Image: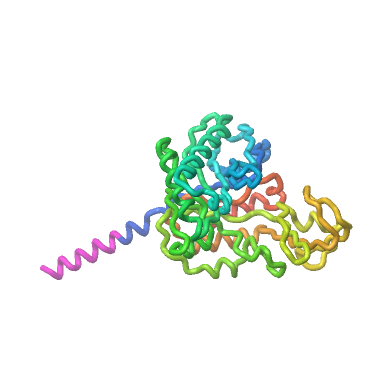
């Protein structure tokens, strides 16, 4: 009798394993981040997004930073939205908040006021949309152990306000925050988006590529169990890192090697590295003779490596969205449609 029952239990257990193993993996949705102040999709861009089956745009609505002259936290770089071509896309506002801003928040009343102002600002910028009832808002902030108390209090206030509208709150998660949650804490939000880039030493001239390298991300493995559902965003951008007298001065966004090669104002001194021969303007910034530029790019090879790393090491069951940072007018020249399709197909 007991042998028959034991055998029956084994059969049931095997059947459960078989059924669960046959369950299809959840469908991962495709998204892009848009990080420019003017959201205006040309007909060609609209067609490209549709062809890639992009259903969501994470659009930076504005920045938030401490302004010394005004003595207060202020919004900067607000987005301007052209609604053409957005009808079939879900728009998720992203608000970038500098970590230094939290040094100037000293009371619960200030936290409440900041949350109110941010909601009001989002509402005003979303007015041109046909359906301004947003389903999610994301906060982007590289918080630290010292700023997490104030930042998390802000997230709680903001999350409660959005919940009244049935709107979810998410936040970006850096690799160091994902790897060491005991140090930086778990943000009180519905979900997070893991930023799989900006992992190197940006300020070191010897750095090869601070945006992404296989060795840099592998150093974070193994990952701990994380209590929040996590999506992932991968890098597809380029910049120039400007050095002056041995110090990193600023970033020049979307600067590529081909922009400088053949230009007599610049001398190529090594792969991805240039010296300024003659003081000049470049992308609105004044460069002095002798300044150095390191060009960092995440092209197809780096993007594919990042996708494979994410597919291997992140929980497939909780992954809902795979995003690429970021959509801009030069992306179609830097990456072909087939290459972008390869990236998304990894998931």
- The colour mode here is rainbow
Residue located 51% across and 42% down the image: 114
Work out whether 337 lies above or below 174. above
Residue 309: x and y in percent read 54, 63
> Magenta span has 32?
no
Residue 182: x and y in percent read 43, 64
Work out whether 206 lies above or below 32. below
Q: How many discs mark residues in the rendered view?
A: 0
Does residue 54 show up? no
Residue 340: x and y in percent read 62, 52
Residue 200: x and y in percent read 62, 65
Residue located 52% across and 34% down the image: 120
Residue located 48% across and 33% down the image: 133
> Magenta span has 7?
yes
Work out whether 33 lies above or below 279. above
Q: Residue furthest left?
A: 1
Residues drawn in magenta: 1-16
Does residue 282 show up? yes
Residue located 10% across and 68% down the image: 1
Chief secondary structure of the magenta span? helix
| Depth order, front residue of 251/239 | 251
| Depth order, front residue of 133/55 | 133
């Amino acid at each position: 009798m007991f042998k028959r029952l034991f055998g029956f239990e084994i059969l049931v257990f095997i059947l459960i394993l078989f059924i669960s193993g046959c369950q299809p993996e959840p469908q991962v949705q495709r998204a892009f981040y848009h990080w420019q102040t003017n959201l205006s999709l040309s007909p060609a861009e609209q067609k490209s997004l549709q062809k890639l089956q992009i259903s969501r745009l994470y659009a930076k609505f504005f920045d938030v930073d401490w302004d010394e002259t005004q003595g207060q936290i202020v919004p900067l770089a607000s987005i301007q939205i052209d609604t053409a071509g957005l009808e079939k896309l879900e728009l998720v506002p992203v608000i970038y908040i500098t970590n230094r801003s939290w040094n100037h928040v000293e009371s619960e009343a200030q936290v409440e006021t900041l949350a109110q102002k941010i909601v009001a600002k989002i509402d005003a910028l979303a007015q041109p949309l046909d359906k301004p009832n947003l389903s999610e808002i994301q906060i982007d902030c590289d918080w630290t152990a010292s700023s997490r108390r104030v930042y998390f209090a802000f997230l709680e206030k903001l999350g409660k306000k959005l919940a009244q509208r049935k709107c979810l709150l998410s936040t970006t998660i850096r690799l160091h925050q994902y790897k060491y949650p005991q140090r930086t804490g778990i943000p009180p939000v519905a979900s997070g988006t893991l930023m799989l880039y900006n992992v190197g030493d940006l300020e070191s001239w010897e750095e090869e590529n601070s945006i992404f390298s296989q060795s840099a991300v592998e150093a974070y493995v193994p990952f701990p169990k994380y209590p929040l559902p996590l999506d992932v965003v991968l890098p597809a951008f380029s910049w120039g890192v400007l050095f002056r007298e041995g110090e990193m001065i600023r970033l020049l966004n979307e600067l590529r090697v081909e922009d400088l090669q053949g230009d007599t104002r610049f001398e190529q001194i090594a792969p991805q590295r240039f010296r300024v021969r003659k003081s000049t303007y470049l992308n609105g910034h004044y460069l002095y003779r002798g300044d150095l530029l390191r060009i960092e790019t995440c092209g197809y090879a780096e993007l594919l490596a990042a996708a494979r790393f994410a597919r291997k090491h992140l929980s497939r069951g909780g992954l809902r969205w795979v995003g690429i940072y970021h959509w801009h007018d030069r992306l179609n020249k830097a990456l072909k449609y087939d290459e972008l399709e390869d990236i998304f197909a990894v998931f």
